[in-house]
Amino acid sequence: MGDQLCRWRILFRRSVCARASCSPYGTRSNSPLHPGLTPWANPFRPFRGLHLDRIARNIWGLLVAANLLANLVPCGFAQTGAALDRQAWLRYALLDANAARAYEYLPANYVLLGRSIVLQNAQQELASGFEKIIGRKLNSGDNVKGSAIFLGTLHDLHSIVSSLRPPISLEEDGYWITWARMHDSECLVVAATNDRGVLYGVFALLSKIARGERIAGINEAQNPYAPIRWVNQWDNLDGRIERGYGGSSIFFEDGKVRSDLTRAGEYARLLASIGINGCTINNVNAAPGVLEPGFLVQVKRIADVFRPWGVKLSIAVDLSSPKVVGGLETFDPLDPRVGDWWRKKADAIYEQVPDFGGFVVKADSEGRSGPSAYGRTHADAANVIAQALKPHGGVVFYRAFVYNHHLDWRDLKNDRAKAAYDNFHPLDGKFDDNAIIQIKNGPIDFQVREPVSPLFAGLRNTNEAIELQITQEYTGQQKHLCFLVPMWKEVLDFDMRVEGQPSRVKDLVSGRIFHRPIGGFAGVANVGMDANWLGSPMAMANLYGFGRLAWNPDLSSETIVDEWTRLTFGSDPVVVKTVADLQLRSWHVYENYTGPLGAGTLTNITGNHYDPGPESSEGNGWGQWHRADHQGIGMDRTVATGTGYIGQYPPEVQKMYESLTACPDSLLLFFHHVPYTYVLHSGKTVIQHVYDSHYEGAEEAQSFVTEWKRVEGRVDGERYHDILSRFEFQAGEAIKWCDAICKWINQLSGIPDEKARIAP
Ligand code: GCW
């Protein structure tokens, strides 16, 4: 292993050497080369002592060279780079003549039953997809007898053929694609119970054709796993995005809604294509100004571009709004004037936006105002808003991300991980039925490895939704490849064993286990104006994957990445295999060189959440992470001797985590404080595992570069070079992480690496 890293280092020493000037470690600013990175800055400076500075400069040289090359290399692809990035997985690339011939039998006409804006849009999408993918024009078949593609609700289709019955009972937004005899001809039918379902059916059909799947004999009906499939954007009204790495807001600039909302419409189309039916457009750290009457008129314009795609608009609101923008002297949720204010506000919104989705609330968290100001509960706060939305069919998402960021870290019983459960479990059953508790997947905050939040099992009489983070705040900020679907699947498949019965997180959040009326999935997406939306073309697999899992969490990571790759890059088998391999390995690789054994990411927690900074995550009120000292590492969260956090899980799960021997290695340091010499299930000591995993992770990150090179000439040149330069950058960053963490823990523990890789 060490040998490989060594070979890699030599390779880069021989390569292009740009004599780049150095800037201080970690300096970041915007640059066209890499968003958030100064083109000539060298982020590897601290490794001089480890003889890595030269390598680092060489990597940097390669980066620069690759970017220069990217502009020179000719390519034979019809569209390249930015144009393709912007289309993402909806590029509808023309199939080659052979592949297209397999669809010659498809009808040349369509019949649209109904005239709603969503249905018309579905028909246009179908026509444009046909033209682009198989080069066929679709004509209106309204007055034509013979074979056609029928689009419509089951209700309308029944007026033509009353015997049509889907193989499963269709729910809201579900669809059915089948062949049926209509007017004595064999027709392709895309049916649903509602218009949005028809649109989803059209996208599903086009996705199949674009990937070369058979349509002959198709009889496929699908229902979404849960009614809530939303994304949250953390956009500020000035156009910046909190934890956004893909440019400025597609919705706002300079305190106003953008005059040109083209990208917002394109985003809604992307969302609809993966079954997302709602989008919260502004930061949960909400500016009260969103509720100003003048602003609502502007918000309406965004809702208008969402509507054809069946995407409901919602906004994040600050609980103090009745006081701050409403002119009341209070925002006490139990004060009748406050209830009245929320009601009138909701009425005014629904007048402008009749299909408005609802509100998202972050309260009593990270400095936001909340019900504690008046000694009220979160249920009081959620319900006053829920009641205002109820007559209109709206919902309120109330976030469980509530914790005290001034905890005394010297008290070993204090534990931020306990906060969500402590705050919300006692209120179970007190929330109105159009309130949904939005719970982050883990008890802390989107780290590379966390156990699932015990609150998922702690609410039985309350609606819940899981909050996943698509934007990679703690997982490399889109500068590193980190495909999160495998992690999300572990979370969603985790069995909480409520009352000793199967109770997977996906079934808890969708409301299936406790028969809740509503529930589901919310993903923090944070796309921006960059052509590639998220700041990196490869990161779009996470947005795609979130939507696909929210629709069907039983899909495998392999299926999702396969679909995404074929739609994004085409079906060249070398490309399909290479991209799948890179994406599927990436989370573990990132985990290995950043923070193994559940110790958090060891990142700079009080700063950029990106660079290594293991010392920053202790000794302040923002939470305790690893409790590393000279003897050992890990956070004792046991009931027996620790913070007692483990006691929040159902008994079977408690038993597994409480016991040192039953606790999985991957979460050992999340739950237990152990000596560095503690021997893992793998047979290695903790300290040796930390060393080895960092070196292995860094080496694997180097291999991404070589692997990606296999697709040269098989994807368009611009995207090839863009992605190549990103992998080269990641390779350097992985070494930076490896060296920083190994050096830190080596000095702290005083225990040498068996393989003697760490310079004194
Ligand atoms: O982890 C923190 C992020 C904040 C974010 C917060 C939250 C929107 O660093 O930027 O604020 O989570 O989820 O509310």
Image (cartoon, rainbow, N blue to C red):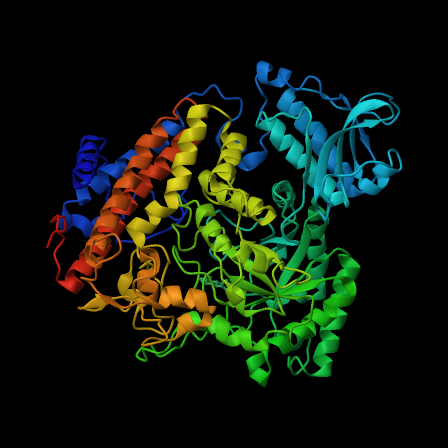
Q: Position of residue 613 (x, y in %)?
A: 29, 60
Instruction: Name the spot of residue 582 as percent of width and height, x first.
Output: 38, 37
The percent coordinates of residue 538 (x first, y second) are: 45, 39
Q: Residue furthest front?
A: 500
**Res. 325 visible in picture:** no
Q: Quadrant of residue 404?
A: bottom left
In depth, the one of 621 and 246 nearer the eye is: 621
* Apparent side of residue 454 relative to residue 614 in the rendered image (left or right): right
Query: Looking at the image, how many numbered discs can be counted on the residues?
Result: 0
> Seen in the image, is 284 located left or right of residue 146?
left
Q: Nearer the viewer, residue 703 or 663?
A: 663
Q: Quadrant of the N terminus?
A: top left
Residue 635 at x, y = what percent? 31, 69
Residue at 33% across, 45% down? 589
Is residue 326 something that shows in the picture?
yes
Quarter of the image where one finds residue 599: bottom left
- Asked whether 535 or 735 is in front, the reply is 735
Name the image quarter holding residue 680: bottom left
Q: Residue furthest bottom?
A: 375
Task: Give the side of residue 41 with respect to residue 93, left or right.
Answer: left
Name the quadrant of the C terminus.
bottom left
Q: Residue at x 69, y 48 (%)?
A: 306
**Above or below, comparing residue 113 to residue 239 in the picture:** above
Q: Is residue 187 left or right of residue 712?
A: right
Residue closest to the eye, 229 or 683: 683
